[in-house]
Image: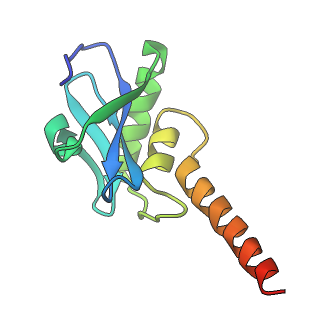
Amino acid sequence: MFGFNVSKMFVIRRRKFQGLVWHYGLLLPEGLVAEFSEGGVRLIPVNMFSAGMDVETMQELSPSTHFDVRARLDAARRNPRQYDLLQWNCETFINWLIGEEPRSVQVRWVAFVAAVAGLVFAFSRS
């Protein structure tokens, strides 16, 4: 699936919950994936991360960021945060890990759709 290169890191993702959402991870140079879920931060083999699904490469990290990424990963493993689907999920964790804003586009999208549906429902009852 992936050829491992000792100098590269990749943000990866695969479908979860029968394709409804994405599960994010960070493929490390040694071939393990850093992931975050209800079980906390784990380093697992790619085949375990994939759970039989296709894995997509989203972004290659610049080698200049690797030291800081490793430092954040070590900190997260020493002092793990509680998983929270809306506030601190796999997507927010990976974004934080790679030095970006810890956000979840998926959660924002679902919140937007729910708000629009709520407005449509409210106006349809008027």
Residue 9's spot in the image, x, y percent? 35, 23
Q: Nearer the viewer, residue 49 or 35?
A: 49
Q: Nearer the viewer, residue 73 or 22?
A: 22
Residue at image coords 19%, 16%: 3
Quadrant location of the C terminus in the rendered image: bottom right
Residue lying farthest to the bottom in this orientation: 125
Residue at image coords 19%, 27%: 31
Q: Is residue 55 visible?
A: yes
> What colour-coding does the image apply?
rainbow
How many callouts does the rendering have? 0
Position of 106 relative to 125 (above/below): above
Residue 45's spot in the image, x, y percent? 16, 37
Q: Nearer the viewer, residue 53 or 6?
A: 53
Quadrant location of the N terminus in the rendered image: top left
Q: Nearer the viewer, residue 122 or 15?
A: 122
Q: Is residue 114 left or right of residue 34?
A: right
Q: Is residue 104 visible?
A: no
Residue at image coords 76%, 73%: 119
Q: Quadrant of residue 100?
A: top right
Q: Is residue 104 left or right of residue 48?
A: right
Position of 49 relative to 62 (above/below): below
Q: Is residue 119 left or right of residue 114?
A: right
Residue 110's spot in the image, x, y percent? 58, 60
